[in-house]
Image (cartoon, rainbow, N blue to C red):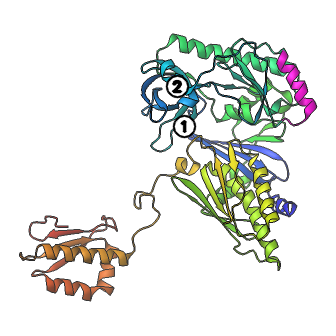
Amino acid sequence: MLERIKKIFRKTEFGEGRRLVINVEKLERRLAVVEDGIVEEYTVERDSDENIVGSIFKGRVKNIEQGLKAMFVDIGFEKNAFLHFWDAIPAALDGGLEEINRAKSQQKKISSKDIPNIYPVGSEVLVQVTKGPIGTKGPRVTTNVSLPGRYLVLMPLNEQFGISRKVEDPKERKRLRRIMEKLTVPEGMGVIMRTVCQGKRVRHFVRDLQILLEQWEEIDAVRTEKKAPVRCFQEPDLIGRVVRDLLTEEIDEILSDDEETVERMKAEVAQISRRTKNKIRHFQSGQPIFSKLGIQKQIDDAFHREVWMPCGGYIVIDETEAMITVDVNTGRNRGSKNIDKMILETNLEAAQEVARQLRLRNIGGLVVIDFIDMKHRRDQNQVYKLMKERLKRDRAKTQVMQISPLGLMEMTRQRLTESLSDSLYDICSYCAGKGRLKSLVTMSIELQRALGSVIERHRERSGDLLIIIHPDVMNRLREEDQELLADLERRHSGRLNFRSDPKLHRETFKILDAETEKELN
């Protein structure tokens, strides 16, 4: 079944393989990760945006909230950064890393109770941004600073050592452990070996470690010489992050429509791998690169509320402030007389598409997926396993639960920055982001109700009333509600005069004293 799905997806300009496609324009840069012709990841960086995730600041503690077990740190932005006590404690390695015990000395254990004494109000603290400002919330930071390199991650303030568990071969892990033991890491610092370490020689790690140590020296110099708040380290731009994080052995080709970007990437990659340098090439075409290679249409289709799948089914994605909800529907999928088989096929494709959409849209938090009800537990397990497998591609941390008796799958996805829709779109100034307007019937009812209230309050006084309404509401009143308005006018000693104003919002109206034009509602 999965092979059939892949064959459908492969009918594109690309064919098989994993590629990075970079579009560079005057105001923005775009990156698409394309696998077998399908866009799996999409990133946009604009000149007007400032991505501070990963950047390191020397800040100053402004206030401590014992109830929240957190402190707020001034790092030079309009909103202070949020530092939870737990993020100020030297962190243990997460579950995706195997800890290597090679530190010569043990760091003194610190608990959350110690944090207010270590960082009192007014004190300076070195922090790294782990989550950018989203909506009304300021950035989130940690004191567990880490510097990612090509193969290693340097932890300059933590003595822990680890290897990514994605390196599964026992022999390779043993080889990497031996290499790690030989690395000359300054006392008080730690190192993590990234997944791309597999098969690399010692010289790659030595060179990478040297670059990271020099980088830390520059950061430490800024920290020492300048007063808080100050930025000590700027996370690289999109092109720099591509070279550092994405140009792995799994990438078959890197295409860009900008010659200067191509030369820059080649120069940076040449220091790491000559073989990878040969994968980078300039793509020349009269058409925009994303349009020529069929990427733009995939992106446009992917950001609709409804996303159709090859089997004929579709998913509906809704973003709310608290969570993301996904509804799975069979749609036009009528390909099998076996209902259970058809439902399983739709749910399997939905699991793949949901995992892809989360990455494409950069959405996260709590995600609830309403799969089509499956009778058999084995079918539910199949969908769950596929979902877990597809989520392994996600660089954001995810956690997924088994399908519940109600057919719901709950999961979480780490939110580091604003979702792509928040970055690309402004909230509608007319509907204020609701996506709906009150119907004309509703507006007519509300207007009549308000008129009745005004007439009742001003029963003792006579005089005409002026009602200003939107033209659409005026048409409704003329065509269908004339009798009702006439009845209201009979209850009032004066006349009801209506005027339409196209500049008025459709959901608002004004009831004025016709003589003084004073608002009465």
The magenta stretch spans residue 448: no
Quadrant location of residue 368?
bottom right
As drawn, the residue found furthest toward the left would be: 461
Percent of width and height locating residue 187: 71, 11
Instruction: Look at the picture and state if 210 lies above or below 467.
Output: above
Front label number (1 vs 2): 2
Residue at 49%, 13% (x, y): give it: 226
Q: Position of residue 240 (x, y in %)?
A: 68, 31
Disc 2, SS: helix
Percent across and percent down for residue 467 are: 21, 73
**Residue that badge 2 annotates:** 113
- Residue 132 numbered tag: 1
Q: Which residues are magenta?
A: 167-181
| Residue lying farthest to the bottom in this orientation | 483
Which quarter of the picture shows residue 261?
Answer: top right
Count every numbered label the image shows and give the total.
Answer: 2
In the image shown, does 150 or 499 lie closer to the viewer?
150
State which quadrant residue 267 falls in. Answer: top right
With respect to residue 193, does 348 lie above or below? Answer: below
Q: Nearer the viewer, residue 304 or 153?
A: 153
Instruction: Residue at 83% x, 29% y: name it.
Output: 197
Residue shown at the point (17%, 79%) measured from the top left:
496
Query: Can residue 345 be seen in this snapshot?
Result: yes
Is 176 in the magenta?
yes
Q: Position of residue 418 (x, y in %)?
A: 55, 44
Depth check, front residue: 105 or 179: 105
Within 10 Å of disc 1 (Cα), the crowding (few <14, some 14-19, many 20+) is many
Q: Amino acid at mark 2?
A: Lys
For the residues labelled 1 and 2, the Cα–Cα distance comes to: 26 Å
Split into 4 quadrants, where in the image is the N terminus? bottom right
Q: Residues within 10 Å of mark 2 (few under 14, many from 20)?
A: few
SS type, badge 1: loop
